[in-house]
Image: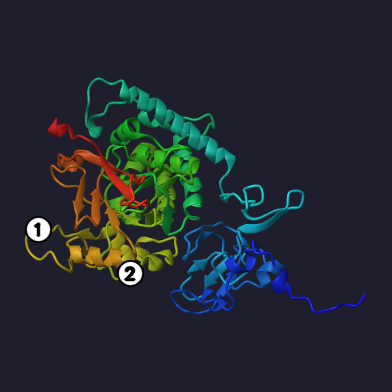
């Protein structure tokens, strides 16, 4: 059959066909193919666990964990094909990278009614792979759940007590046994080591900078004060599958009377709720500090020299894998110590590889300061502007309000939340540096400081009028009063 004329596709295209208008523009792949930081070409990466297949042969790098997209912040699951910079290790998902883009809208025709329109893909079409944590067995989860159930029972007993006491004066006979007694048949030391190893496998897959969606609660230093930890759970809520996320901002151990109970329950919570509980490293999550400030002696006193040393070293290996900070709602950085001189970026943090020993921490000055630095209060005597030496160590720094302001501006942050300091007769929290910095400290009456204990509750506000932003984050302190003030 002969054609009477040439076929004009553009004239035949129906008006409702949105595919070309909403698709990628021609030539836009150039910018997408370069790293935003280094401006070098991005390479394809598949996180294949050491298996070199036909797919991995075309990849620029083989690694064993996921991450998050530096452009859209979407979670990149372990094993998922994406793009990565070979210089700075920035990661970009397939949606934001130079590869193939699958449009989330499609053109629809109902031939019976003649209806023609653009529709959005639904969940039945978009099959999402759920993250599966390597190295975590069902027995680990069962063990963690038993410990959490034991903690809930202890919480109930605590709620029924009529007399309030300091954590160090709390007489709960057989507390450690009551918390870590399980059906597994393992002794207490074996239970603690199992929880530590399982939690280590999980945190090793978390990014050095963890992405946390609000609502969430942020705990400051606990320092082995188990009773205070349970009081906060009893009063303001405990981690669960359906509740808010929880960020524990370091210094779980050392100095307190119930360090094994605190670290054991925290690791159990991480194993049971790996995507709801986030752990930041503090300056006391370190073998050198643990031996100096008595977490090590707590282990050997409880289990004897040989077994106690094994428990200590198992937890030190866990400490070395801990992430360094959490980013809540893309706008609040939660870090144990502070920002040091502020001359670093969130991308620098994302590029930090773990595990990190004590020597590794000292070798990276900005990382060391994330654990050790302190802010200068605006009303302090002397210079409150700039960066100054700190009495804590040779490389630790104290930073003024202008450093916090500049750091937030450079990293698109609205607030830095830190812990690390207990203030004498304080309220457990402080608002500093023109509301760009908050301190939170959870252990009450710490080392005789007569301080309240606090946590922070971060939520998304709902706009009530046109003048209110619809993406506002609200930070609310939740406090338990010091016994010395009662």
Left or right: 480 with respect to 217?
Answer: left
Q: Which residue is mark 1?
A: 380
Which numbered marker is on residue 344?
2
Residue shown at 28%/53% (left/top)? 417
Disc 1 crowd rating (10 Å Cα; few below 14, some 14-19, many 20+) is few
Q: Quick one: quadrant of the C terminus?
A: top left
> Eyeballing the image, is 171 above or below 17?
above
Residue shown at 47%/65% (left/top)? 71
Q: How many marks?
A: 2
Asked if marks 2 and 1 touch (Cβ < 8 Å), the reply is: no
**Considering depth in this image, is 468 or 331 the residue closer to the camera?**
468
> Eyeballing the image, is 42 above or below 399?
below
Residue shown at 45%/78% (left/top)? 38
> Eyeballing the image, is 197 above or below 479?
below
Residue 215: image quadrant is top left
Residue shown at 22%/28% (left/top)? 165
The kind of secondary structure element at disc 1 is loop
Q: Is residue 186 visible?
A: yes
Q: Quick one: quadrant of the N terminus?
A: bottom right
């Amino acid at each position: 059959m002969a054609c009477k004329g040439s076929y004009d596709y553009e004239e035949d295209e129906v008006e409702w066909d949105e595919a070309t208008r909403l698709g990628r523009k021609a030539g836009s792949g150039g910018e997408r193919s370069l790293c935003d930081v280094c401006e070098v070409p991005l390479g394809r990466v598949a996180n294949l666990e050491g298996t070199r297949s036909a797919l991995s042969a075309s990849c620029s790098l083989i690694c064993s964990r996921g991450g998050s997209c530096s452009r859209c912040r979407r979670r990149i699951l372990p094993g998922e094909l994406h793009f990565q910079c070979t210089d700075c290790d920035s990661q970009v998902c397939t949606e934001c990278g130079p590869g193939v883009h699958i449009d989330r809208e499609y053109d629809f025709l109902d031939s019976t009614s003649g209806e023609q329109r653009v529709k959005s893909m639904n969940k039945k079409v978009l099959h999402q792979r759920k993250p599966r944590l390597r190295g975590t067995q069902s027995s680990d989860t069962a063990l963690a759940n038993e410990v959490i159930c034991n903690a809930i029972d202890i919480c109930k007993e605590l709620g029924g007590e009529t007399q309030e006491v300091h954590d160090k004066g709390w007489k709960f006979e057989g507390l450690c046994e009551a918390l870590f007694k399980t059906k597994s048949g393992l002794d207490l030391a074996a239970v603690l080591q199992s929880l530590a190893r399982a939690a280590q496998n999980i945190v090793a897959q978390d990014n050095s900078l963890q992405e946390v969606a609000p609502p969430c609660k942020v705990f400051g230093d606990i320092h082995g004060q188990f009773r205070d930890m349970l009081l906060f759970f009893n009063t303001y809520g405990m981690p669960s599958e359906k509740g808010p996320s929880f960020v524990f901002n370091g210094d779980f151990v050392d100095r307190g009377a119930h360090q094994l109970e605190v670290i054991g329950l925290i690791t159990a919570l991480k194993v049971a709720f790996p995507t709801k509980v986030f752990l930041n490293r503090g300056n006391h999550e370190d073998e050198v500090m643990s031996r100096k400030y008595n977490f090590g002696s707590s282990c050997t006193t409880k289990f004897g020299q040989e077994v106690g040393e094994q428990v200590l070293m198992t937890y030190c290996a866990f400490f070395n894998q801990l992430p360094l900070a959490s980013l809540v709602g893309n706008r609040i950085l939660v870090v144990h110590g502070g920002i040091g001189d502020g001359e670093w970026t969130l991308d620098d943090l994302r590029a930090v590889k773990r595990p990190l020993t004590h020597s590794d921490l000292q070798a990276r000055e900005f990382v060391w300061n994330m654990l050790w630095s302190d802010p200068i209060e605006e009303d302090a005597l002397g210079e409150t502007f700039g960066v100054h030496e700190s009495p804590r160590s040779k490389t630790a720094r104290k930073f003024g309000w202008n450093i916090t302001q500049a750091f937030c501006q450079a990293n698109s942050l609205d607030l830095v939340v830190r812990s690390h300091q207990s203030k004498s007769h304080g309220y457990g929290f402080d608002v500093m540096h023109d509301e760009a910095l908050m301190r939170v400290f959870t252990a009450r009456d710490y080392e005789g400081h007569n301080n309240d204990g606090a946590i922070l509750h971060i939520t998304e506000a709902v706009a009530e009028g046109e003048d209110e932003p619809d993406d506002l984050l609200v930070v609310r302190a939740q406090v338990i009063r010091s016994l010395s003030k009662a």
